[in-house]
Amino acid sequence: MKRGITLVGMGTAKESIQVAMLVPESERFIEWQERNDPRGVRRLIKRLKREALGELGTCYEAGPCGYALQRALVANEIECVLVAPSLIPVKPRERIKTNRRDARHLAKSYRAGTLTEVRPPDAGYGVSSSRTRSIRCSTTASERSSMPRSGSPIWIVRFGTPRASHLRTALRSGCTSTAVARELVGFIWATLMQRETPENVKNLGRSIAA
């Protein structure tokens, strides 16, 4: 159990941060809400430092709101733990979730030492991920067209086997500005090349160019 430390649970949402603070030797929550934007986070940091007694520790659930809040707190020398949501102990009758309940429950669980921490990715994770996606998108259309049915791209599952009209529509609408769209057009073309006779493919090329 964490005693002698001010512990803070936060319920994060897209627009707001609900805060529940437990100071040492007290079971009474100090609660407030801040906007989830840069100005609101700066106000949150100032108030946390002002209200805290002794050491300060904060936590919130890892989720769709990302890791910007955690990085901002750590950059201002405030300990912040990201918690695995699926491993937070919950009583059978406490299934209704609100930001206020989440913040309180996190603060109490943090004090009891029952939370499971997850490690946030490095700040450069998004950049490396985008590069990986770009590399994947550059896979040749011929390699994709040779995939088994179970490995076919999602658009084949949704729209069926590519047809010449799909390629004509895609090219004429000018929708090849993204890597995924270009990959789609390449996949359709490769499929047609395998299925159609050379004369039909040549005629298709003439009709698109016209």
Image (cartoon, helix red, strand yellow):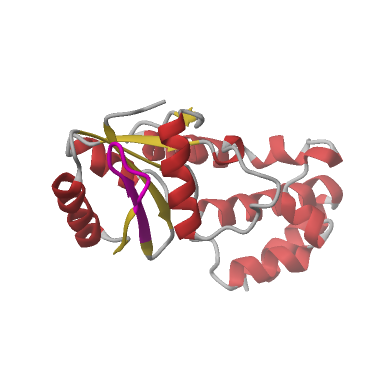
Quarter of the rendering occupied by the N terminus: top left
Q: Is residue 9 left or right of residue 83?
A: left
Residue drawn at 84 percent across, 58 percent down = 160
Asked which quadrant contains residue 162, the reply is: bottom right
Would you place residue 116 above or below residue 60 in this image? above
Whether residue 144 is visible, yes or no, is yes
Q: Is residue 120 left or right of residue 88?
A: left
Q: Position of residue 125 (x, y in %)?
A: 39, 34
Q: What is the residue that sits farthest to the top in this orientation?
A: 1
* Quadrant housing the C terminus: bottom right
Which stretch is magenta? 17-29
Above or below 173: residue 98 = above
Quarter of the view holding residue 86: top right
Residue 31 lies in the magenta-colored region? no
The spot of residue 124 in percent (x, y) is 33, 34
**Residue 43: % across, % down:** 18, 57
Residue 128 in which image quadrant: top left
In the foreground, 21 or 130: 21
Q: Position of residue 91 (x, y in %)?
A: 65, 44
Residue 162 visible at all: no
Residue sitting at x 59%, y 35%: 87
Query: Which residue occupies 34% across, 54% down?
Result: 19
- The answer to which of 74 and 104 lies nearer the viewer is 104
Q: Residue 27 colored magenta?
A: yes
Q: How many marks?
A: 0
